[in-house]
Structures are given as structure tokens and as C-alpha cells.
Amino acid sequence: MDKVAAAIADPVRRRILQMLRDDRVSAGQLAARFEISRPAVSRHLRVLRDSGLVSDTLIGRRRMYELRADRFAPLIEWLAQFSPAAGWEHRFDALETEVYRTRRERRRRTEADHREEDTA
């Protein structure tokens, strides 16, 4: 998780990840989209690869990079504890439980009323 957090701390690396979101992209294509040098882009790609956020495949002379979005999961889970929505999820779960309890009680009362009518 720490390597992932460190990797996404840099704006260039975040932009690279966005570029890889939908498709595999070659190192040359990535480097062409930046005003920094190709070696600098290569260093950023190495950090992303070492963190596990991207994988690379050599196809002929081209090195293709691909996003591994599943590597974000531990960081997302950890960050979720700080989200106000997390409290709402708990409240919605409690509401769902209350709705089911209320429905069950109403069903029991209705069944009891029907039994009383049948015996009367």
C-alpha cells in the first residue's frame, strides 16, 4: 500500500495512470505526451512498475504498458475509513435491518389477525 501511495504522489505518474486507464500504450507514446525527457518518463514508469500499478510487455521493439487497477484496492479500502460515506453505509445497513424487522412484525400481526378471524 505504501508503494502505491508513493507512486501516485507525483502528478506525472498520475497522468500516466490516466493515460493507461483504457488501453495499453507504448513507452514512446507516453513519452511523446510530456514535455519532460524520455529518460525522465522512463524513471516514472519504473516507479509505477515497481509499485505494481503497471505491467509492461515487450512486443517486438516496443514496450507496452498496461494499468493494473486491482493494485489500488488496499489503498482504496484504507482511505474509505476517512470517507463520510462510510458512516452512511452503516446507517443504511441499520435502516435495512429495521425495515425487515418492521415487515416481519407486520406480517406476524396480519397472520395473527387472520387466525382470530378464522376462529371467530
Image: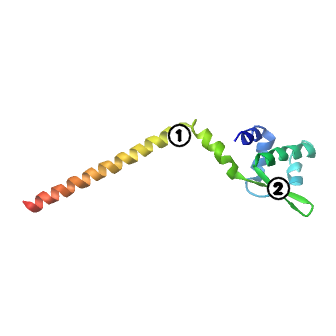
In the displayed structure image, the side of residue 114 where residue 21 appears, left or right = right
Q: Amino acid type of disc 1?
A: Ala
Q: Nearer the viewer, mark 1 or mark 2?
A: 2
Q: Which x, y percent locates residue 117?
A: 11, 59
**Where is the C terminus found, in terms of image quarters?**
bottom left
For mark 2, does the 10 Å Cα neighbourhood hold few (<14), some (14 to 19), or many (20 or more) residues?
some
Residue under the image location 32 percent in, 48 percent down: 101
In the displayed structure image, the side of residue 4 where residue 108 appears, left or right = left
- Give the mark nearest the N terminus, 1 or 2: 2
Tag 1's secondary structure? helix
The answer to which of 6 and 31 lies nearer the viewer is: 6
Residue 9 sits in which quadrant? top right
Q: Amino acid type of disc 2?
A: Asp
In the displayed structure image, the side of residue 29 where residue 71 appears, left or right = left
**Where is the N terminus found, in terms of image quarters?**
top right
Tag 2's secondary structure? strand
Q: Is residue 115 above or below residue 45?
A: below
Q: Which x, y percent locates residue 85?
A: 53, 40
Q: Which x, y percent locates residue 96?
A: 39, 48
Residue under the image location 26 percent in, 50 percent down: 105
Separation of residues labelled 1 and 2 (CA atoms): 36 Å
Q: Is residue 113 above or below residue 81?
A: below
Q: Could you say which disc has been placed on residue 56 in the image? A: 2
The answer to which of 73 and 16 lies nearer the viewer is: 73
Residue for badge 1? 85
Q: Is residue 115 above or below residue 7?
A: below
The answer to which of 12 and 61 lies nearer the viewer is: 61
Residue under the image location 40 percent in, 43 percent down: 94
User: How many marks are shown on the rendered structure?
Assistant: 2
Residue under the image location 30 percent in, 48 percent down: 102
